[in-house]
Structure formats: C-alpha cells, structure tokens
Image: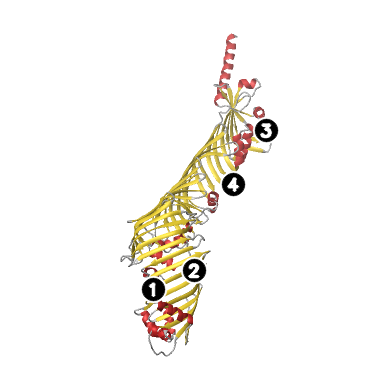
Amino acid sequence: MIKNLLKILISVLLIVIIFIGYFAYFGITTSQFNSFIKEQFKKQNNNLDIDLKKVKLHLDLKNISIKIKTKNPNIIINNYDKVELNEITLNISISSYFQNKFSIKNLTINSKDNKISSYINFYIHSNNSLKLILLNQVLKQGMAKININLNFDEAGNIINDYNLSGKVSNAEIQIPKNITLTKLNFKFNVTDKNYKLEEILFKFNKINFNSEFLKIKEKNNKFLVKGNLKNKKNKINDDIIFLFFNDSLKNFDLSNSKFDSTSEFTFDFNKKYKIKNLKIQSSLNIDELFLKYDFYKIKNYVKNYDNLINLKENKFNIKYFDKKFIVDGSSEFYIVKNLKNLIQFQFEKSKKRMNFETFLNLENLDLVFEDFAYKKIKNDKATLKIKGFSDNKKLFFKHINYKEKNNKIEINNLEIKNNKILNIDKIKLDYFTINNFKNQINLIKKDINYELTGSSFDSIKLIENISNSETDRNFFEIFENLNSKVKISIQEVKLDDKSSVNDLNGNLVVKNNKIFDLNLNSNFTNNDKLFISIKTQKDNAVVTTFYSDRAKPFVKKYKFIKGFEGGNLDFSSKKINNISRSKLIIDNFKVQEVPVLAKLLTLASLQGIADLLTGEGVRFTDFEMIYSNKDSLMTIDEIYAIGPAISLMMEGYVESNKLISLRGTLVPATTINRTISSIPILGDFLVGKKVGEGVFGVSFKIKGPPKNLKTRVNPIKTLTPRFITRTLEKIKKN
C-alpha cells in the first residue's frame, strides 16, 4: 500500500517535473491568457487595448514568473489608431497574479513598419512626456520599426530604465523658421534622458545631407544637442541662399555652383524651443561663384573688366560661438578671363562689429591708377594686405599695404563713414610713376594737423587733371569735415618731362573741407620763381594767385595747344557765392599749333601766317584773358593777344561739353601798324610816317559743340575803337 502510494507520488512528482520542464523549455501555446493580458493593459492605461492571437507561455524559474510571447498582435490606441507588431513578450509575476495585483514586470515589443505618429500617440498615452510632445510637433510623416523594452513597478508605472531602438525611414520634419527635412532615414536608440541617432540621411531643399551621429541629452529641463553634418558635391539652389543670406548675395550667380561641407555643432534648447549656446565648426567648399556687378571703380584700374568676377576653389572654415561668427578661407579670383589671382581672408563678426583681414595676390593683373601715375603690368608680383573692422556706422582700416617689386603704398588708420573720410593717420607713397620718376612722399598726422614731406613727387598727372578738368572740383570733399593745418616740404616736384621745381615749401589751412589759406613757394633750376596763394577773405571771397616764370609746364597740358614755348604766367581769381572772376596773363611766348586759329587764318586768306603757325610758330608778346565761371558756364569778357604777325580780340562763352560760342576780330600786324600810323601826331611818334593802303581786319565767329566747331570769317575795312584802344595800351605799356 505504502509502496503503491509512493509510486503514485513519485509519478505525480515526475509528471509535475516533466510539465515544469516542458513549460520552462518548450512552453505552452494557449489563448487562455488573452483576457488577462488585455486586463493588464487596461490597468496600465484605459486608453490602450491589445488585439491578441494565441500566445505562448514559458515558465521562468529564476524570476518565478511566466514569460508570455505572442506573434503579430496589434496595440489599439483610443479605438482608432493602432500599432502593428511582430512580437510581444511579457514577464508576469506569479505571486502578483495570485494576489490580483498588476503583475507585468517587463514588456518587450518588436514592431513592424508603422507610422511614426502612431508610436508617438501610443507612448504619449503611456507616459505623457515633454520630449514626446515635442517630437510630435516636428514629425509630420514617416515610418519606423521599433524595439521597446519596458519595466514596470508594482503600481503598473513604467520605470525610467526603458530602452527604445529601431530605424526610421522616409520621415519628414518641420522645425522652426519653416525649415523642412524630407526623406529622413536614421537608426536610433532612446533611454530615459538620452537620445542617439546614427547613420542619418535626409534631403533639405533638394540637397542630400548625411550625419554620423546626433546625440540629445535631457538635463535640468533642457535638451543638450551634439552632432555633425556632411554633404558631398551638390548643386546650390536659391532657396538655401535666401534662407541663410537673404539678399546679401543677390549679385552672385550660383546657378551652376556645387558645394560640399562638413560641420560639427552643439546647442541646447528649452521647453519653449528657444535655442541657446549654439556652437558650429564647419568647412565649406564651393567650386565656382560668379559675381555680376558694375564696379565702376574697378574699370578705372583693371583693363578688360566686363562686370564679371569669377571665384573658383572657394574654401571656407566657419566657426560660430558666443554669438561670434568667424570665417577664414581662400579663393581663386578671375577679374579678367584666364588670369588667376589669389585671395585669403578672415572675418570675425560679433553683434555690433566685424573684424576683417584680407590678403590678395595680384600677380596676374594689369593695373593702372591714372590719378597716381602708376602702372603695373601682368606677371609683376604684387600683393595687397588689408586689416580693419566695421560697425554699424563706420569702416576702419588699420592697415592697407600694397607692394610690387620696390614699389610700396601704405595707409594707416583710415576711418570712413558714409563714404567720407573721418580720419587718416598716415599715407606713405614710395613708387616709380609711369614717367619713371620716384614718388616718395609721406603724409603724417600730428595731433589734429598734418605734415606732408618727401624727397620727390611727380605732379605731371595732377597738373594734367587740373588743366583738363571742366568742373570746380574740391579734393577735400572726400572728407567728412576736415579742419587741419598742413605743413608742406618736398625737395623736388616734377612738372613735366623736362621741368622740375626744387624746395617746394609752404602751409595749407583747411576749414570745413575748404582751402582757407594756402602759400607755396618754389624755384626752378635757374632761380625762376613759382608762387601759389589762396586766401579766404572776411566776406568769404576766395582769392587765388598763381605766378610762374615758366608758363610752358602749365599751358602745354591743354590738348588744343601744341608747341608752346617761352612765356611767364600770371593768374588771379576771386570767387564768391560760387561765381568766380579771373584774369590770365601770359607774356612773350609762341605756339606752333592751335587748330581753331589755323583754320581761321586759312579762311581769312592769311595762308602765309597759317604756314608759319604750323612751322616755326607764331609769336605773341601779350596774352590776356578776362572771364567768369558759374556752374558749368564760362563767360569770356575778353581775350586779347598781340604779336608781330597777328593780333586778335574775342569774347563769348563756353558751356561745358555742350557749346562754344566766340566772336572777335583778327588783324595782321601790317594792318595794325598802318592803323596806328594813321592816327595824327600819335601815329607819327609811335610808328613813323608810312603810307598805307587803308585799314584791314577780319571779323569771325566760332560756334558749335566742342568736337564740331563751325568757323565763319568776314573781311572788314574798319577796326573797332576798342581794338585800337587796347592795342595802343599794349604798345604804350611795352
């Protein structure tokens, strides 16, 4: 009996052991627990439900729990949304089950491809987390496969040691400032306060980007973000340019430009999505840019400039931190086709200021600076260095250094506002001009005043510009409001290819950008004098006096006069209320070619004198011009010239670049003699007793635009009393 009972017990025990072993190893497939699992889901969140097929149970002897697995279930959210799963695994505490408590200890979910919004919806109902609400705001579409591992406490709450991992495909994200990322793909791993994304691919404005990683860490109610971003050669589009640069690059043609970039960044943002502590370090390469712009100043200096600058191999290193934006890089630039030059640059921009430093290699450029009489030819090595800063109001150049062989130009502490010079501390010119003459002068600031000193200065181009200028140009208009004294001392000043003056000394006083007082004295080689004076009187009238024992250096620059020789020049002018009255006197000179005069002599049948004019020249003993200027109109009250061969008098006006209108009288010398001799008593005394055939002269008119003048002549038998009077005055004076 006992023996039989023992056998029965052993058999039962064996059956139990076998059952437990089978249960633990193979498991049991059943649908009996479906209602229980649903009930546990409902206990965790009443808005969640689960659609189960048959489940498989395994006994976990170690944790005294039952592991439940089910294939292809669906999680139902609020009876309208669902998440399709491959598998759910639950660990149910046996003791909690029999105590009618929440018994799920662990939940593992392996999903199929589902809408990302469904996952977020599920998790929000499970754990109303800020980070998920935030994610739901920016994610607009996409699919994902997710692996979820959740642990629960006895109350059914998810413990913060959860883990989410998986893969997102074809997502779309919209972040602040209307930035949209499409075709987003990445792998992810999420724990309680850490998010890690890897193998990220996305498209932004039709450009493909990739990232090795993006890490987000939640700390102190903030999200700390760290990541990198790359792209291979992509074509630049206008939307990206406008997003980052607005209209600042509107003159750049980027239609055929390609770029690649690598960036690393960190930042944090709060619950209100406000980004702080942004740090970016990037390298950017753009193969080619075209700058289309009418730089009229470049045209003055660079031959064959066609309003297009080509920038190639553009390399940029970009840093952003502490609200500072730093860019350094280099480019090849082509102002003229096939002529490569190099530029290196660095910019540092803060909130109110931008520091800059630029280096240009100008070896392959032909440069011409007409105003400075300087020329550089291609293949001559040349560099330009610029360093300074700008703010909202002004532009400050600390250094501007140009160097080409032994030629140097240096400018220090140049300050500009509204295209006007506020200050300049130093200008140093040390170069050979196109006339092969050394410009070696320094302008140095001393307190509020300046010293202009040097060993030599080529003024040929300066004199030419002044002589040919048809406007009353004020050089000091480039300054904002200059009030200074300038002490001038230059050892040698070149006036033309044959003439120079020595020891140019004097003082200049400038008030409110206008010359208030100027005195300059110098000597030619044989002690001939040169004197310039400008004085501002109490009534604000400006009186100018200019005298030179040699007229040629200043007259020969006028294009309509050739072969000018001899003479001294005396000029005086008084200007008040923008109206000037002037007097020019030149004595004892001759000219070989004056086109208008030559034509006048030919039309008057004075061919002999015309031939003389184009040969050895026509001599004049006296020349006097009285005229006035107002705006662009010159009114000539009188031009009077007397010489052995001819004399003339004329008056009229010249409207700048528009119209010339002159009329006057031309008289051969023999006629003048006869006219004077016919005057009773006085004629006998001055000329002697000669029998004349009568008085003869020519009246003329010259009128038309400067390049198409029309000349008319009319022989006359009598001269005007005014002509005779002026002739007598000159003869008497001589």
Is residue 417 visible in the rendered image? The answer is yes
- Amino acid type, callout 3: Asn
Instruction: Report the front residue among 91 and 414.
Output: 414
Foreground tag (4 vs 2): 2
Tag count: 4
On the image, the x and y values in percent for residue 93 come to 60, 23
- Which residue was labeled with disc 3? 47
Instruction: Report the front residue among 240 and 580.
Output: 580
Q: Residue furthest top?
A: 2
Tell me the quadrant of the picture where the C terminus can be found: bottom left
Question: Considering only vertical position in the picture, is 212 above or below 684?
Answer: above
272 sits to left or right of 599: right
Q: Earlier in the sequence, mark 1 or mark 4?
A: 4
- Which residue was labeled with disc 4? 178
- Amino acid type, callout 2: Arg
Disc 3 to disc 2, C-alpha distance: 100 Å
Circles 4, 3 touching at the beta carbon (< 8 Å): no
Q: Residue at x 36, y 69 (%)?
A: 550
On the image, the x and y values in percent for residue 556 come to 38, 71
Instruction: Report the front residue among 397 and 279.
Output: 397
- Which residue was labeled with disc 2? 581
Q: Earlier in the sequence, mark 4 or mark 2?
A: 4
Q: Crowdedness of circle 4 by 10 Å Cα count: few (<14), some, many (20+)?
A: few
Q: Earlier in the sequence, mark 1 or mark 3?
A: 3
